[in-house]
Image (tube, rainbow, N blue to C red):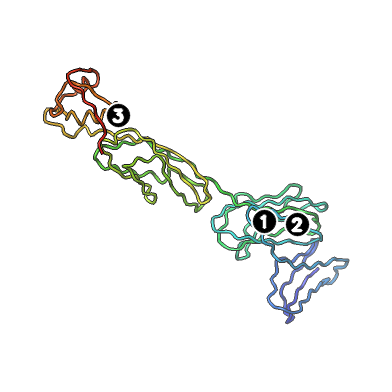
Amino acid sequence: MKLIILKPDDTALKTSSFSDSDTELSDLSLPDSGTYKVIVDAQFSTLGDYALNLFRYEPISIDFGASIKGNIGLAGEKDCYTFLGNASDLISVTLDKEYVSGKRMKLIILKPDDTELKSGSFSDSDTEFSDLYLPDSGAYKIIVNGQYSTLGGYTLSITKINHPPRVFQPISAQTAIENIEYSFTFDANTFVDDDRGDNLFYTIQSLPQWLTFDENMRTFIGTPTICDIGVFSIEIFASDTSSATAFTSFKLTAVYDVNKDVNADGQLNLLDVILSLKVLAGFQDFSFNADLNRRISWKEIITVLLIESEYCHQSLSRKN
């Protein structure tokens, strides 16, 4: 049996011949306004009854996160929906069927240029296209096709899927030295996001005053002084365009520069050492038997910390 559609000028828009299966000419866009003709040709010896159905569908807009109920009431009927998507969006389309007759229902997704992105026919189970990446930006179409004799209701849902960022490569402990510029750039693979094209944005917490962070370069820069000596826990938060967040931290230790003020005998300046040890150990006062203006050995430094003498009491405080 042959099916022919003629345009208003009587030239053929579409022609198809079918034998033992039903005939469907689908997704035809009419090029002109006017009166069209549909011709059913028995083609010599093909005889029998037939049913001809003609449907015009207007796409219905559906947004991400929404669900729409529909119904296929006639054989060959289709419902068409449209949504706006961006290239690299990851989506899921679900069709929950409630049909009462027939065996199969078809789901078709068309790209903005009306070529097929995905299609499938399903029988006794619900339909889901999951983890589907959109190749282009623009208006996509979803077509629910009853396929001849499949009738009944359904619920169509569309969801944009977001995979949150995650920590992929932890940051090892870092060391900064007093009065020497510290610079550290953490690796681009410290955080990863499984969504194509998703950008990450970084925020920092527990950042000491002497340290700054350049988000674009993922770089920490700063110079600790003797009063900044200590151990810091730096917290890094990575957020994607959907505000999903991942977190990691690393330990940064600012240490005394043991190479500064070292004389030829390998001795250190007493006052600098005591100030440094005071900050590290949390001491408020030191008592020692020594002259602050001379240089001492490591043995004497240990003695300063362990032995309290009434000969001289020095109270140390941080100076800005």
x and y, in percent, of residue 173 in the image:
36, 35
Mark pair 3, 2: CA separation: 70 Å
Q: Is residue 297 left or right of residue 306?
A: left
Q: Which residue is mark 1?
A: 119
Query: Which residue is identified by label 2?
Result: 70
First along the sequence among labels 2 and 1: 2
Give the label on residue 280, or none: 3
Q: In percent of the image, x 70 and y 73: which residue is there?
A: 30
Secondary element under disc 1, as helix, strand or loop, is: strand
Q: Quadrant of the C terminus?
A: top left
Residue type of the residue flagged with mark 3? Leu
Left of 305 or right of it: where is 51? right
Q: Residue at the left extreme? A: 264
Q: Nearer the viewer, mark 1 or mark 3?
A: 3
- Contact between marks 2 and 1 (CB within 8 A): the answer is no
**Image spot of residue 113 (x, y percent):** 60, 66
What residue is at 76 percent from the left and 58 percent from the top? Answer: 147
Distance from disc 1 to disc 3, alpha carbons, whole Å, reads: 67 Å
N-term-proximal mark, 1 vs 3: 1
Q: Amino acid at mark 2?
A: Gly
- Callout in the foreground (3, 2): 3
Q: Secondary structure at mark 3?
A: helix
Residue type at tag 1: Ser
- Judging depth in this view, the residue of 164 and 285 nearest the camera is 285
Mark 1 is surrounded, within 10 Å at the Cα level, by few (under 14), some (14 to 19) or many (20 or more) other residues, namely: few
